[in-house]
Image (spheres, grey):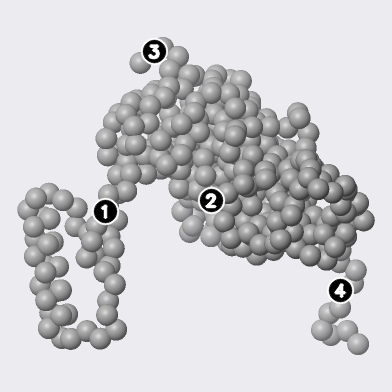
Amino acid sequence: MAKDVVIRTEGLGKKYIISHQAERDRYTALRDVIWRTVRGWGRSAWDMVSGRPLIAGDETEEFWALRDVSFEIQRGEVVGIIGGNGAGKSTLLKILSRITEPSEGRVTIQGRVASLLEVGTGFHPELTGRENIYLNGAILGMARAEIRRKFEEIVAFAGIETFLDTPVKRYSSGMYMRLAFAVAAHLEPEILVVDEVLAVGDAEFQKKCLGKMQGVAELGRTVLFVSHNMAALQSLCSRSILLRGGAVIFDGSTGDAVSRHLKVGEPSDRSSLQQVEGRRGRGTFRFVAARVGPASPSETSIITGKSLKFELEIVGPKDSALAPSSISIVILNRHGEILFICDTDASMSSLPLIRGGRSLCTCTIKEVPLSGSEYMYSLFLGRAGEIEDFIDVAGRFQLADSPFFGTSRNCAPGWEGKGVLVPHIWELTSLVCSGDK
């Protein structure tokens, strides 16, 4: 390994064996149950003799979470790991953190690794915050005197002084994460690995974490950062590795990686609608193309709270002059549920289409009120009370998460992409106790 290379992977792969239960008939005879049981014993015995893993199920298949992953990371680099769900990001970090072993390939690491892969990693729930600080330090191979020297700084950064001697099982997820990050970042690891756990912190603490990671890098240490927050990745990482289907498809500047991940600027974000099946309407006027992307040319991706622009190309017949029109864009989540509609009639926008030529119509949403997820859109074109063209699913687009409320969380976990974000204010106006008259 070169002197300044601290992480090198060569042909890295991770394979899992997945079992599938065969679909059962509604009626099963006793002889069928006995036969399946005996057959299962026989298969398990053969697997044991042949050295294969023992997997319960009628059918098994191989699933490669990572395949042929190779890259090098230099000392002091801050590298982002980008990819959709199931791309292999967490599996890669677990291998680099020595939590799991690869199925093939080789990993070479120089230096002590501190990883924060999920809330409470390495913490014992029955121990207090104070005790867990010393436990984590010992896991990282640090001497007690070294931990004691950093102790006050860790506690101050986490902001949990009041609960320092409380068992961490009573901590909220935010308190858990604050202490875990403070320990991982302050105990001077040569390599800091951080997964999406920062999403549970508030905006102020997230800003502190990003600043701390920048400070760690300035001291010559290496940071690997996984996040679905494209804005945070672009502000922190100059380089990113894009994973898709367990393979590295891009390794370069973060801006280019984000653009490739969100497919912005590629031909696929401009959908041809000429051959779409299942459309409805008279067809005198028709959508022939659609494009969705950021409204500002300085933005490389569609981001929560930022501007979004649709460009719709429409053709009409040659035998008439201008024709008034009604155009709608229906935004749906990935489950097909309608979230909101942009409509020319509702906004009192008059858009006469040009007969005998192509019309280019644009619709700009100044602040996209959606959390990071994949979305679909339908297109409607009407004239004189008649449907000219209606396409149920005209295209899809990916939205990158960014703080909408000034905090690090736009919605509760599991609710991403399921609703519209609405600015709001909570206040406690009065407190009535049960004993008051």
N-terminal of the pair, mark 4 or mark 1, is: 1
Considering every residue shown, the one lying at the far front of the view is 319
Amino acid on which disc 1 is placed: Glu
Q: Nearer the viewer, mark 2 or mark 4?
A: 2
Residue 381 at what x, y percent from top left?
76, 56
Q: Nearer the viewer, mark 3 or mark 1?
A: 1
Q: Nearer the viewer, mark 2 or mark 3?
A: 3
Residue 192 at what x, y percent from top left?
51, 32
Judging by the rendered image, the residue that carries numbered circle 1 is 61
Amino acid on which disc 3 is placed: Ala
N-terminal of the pair, mark 2 or mark 3, is: 3
N-terminal of the pair, mark 4 or mark 3, is: 3
N-terminal of the pair, mark 3 or mark 1, is: 3
In the image, what residue occupies the spot 67% across and 45% down? Answer: 288
Q: State yes or no: discs 4 and 3 in contact (Cβ < 8 Å).
A: no
Amino acid on which disc 4 is placed: Leu
Secondary structure type for disc 4: loop
Secondary structure type for disc 2: loop
In the image, what residue occupies the spot 75% across and 63% down? Answer: 387
Tell me: residue 47, above or below residue 205: below
Judging by the rendered image, the residue that carries numbered circle 3 is 2
Q: Nearer the viewer, mark 4 or mark 1?
A: 1
Q: Gap between marks 3 and 1, in whole Å?
A: 39 Å
Residue 14 at what x, y percent from top left?
32, 41
Judging by the rendered image, the residue that carries numbered circle 4 is 431
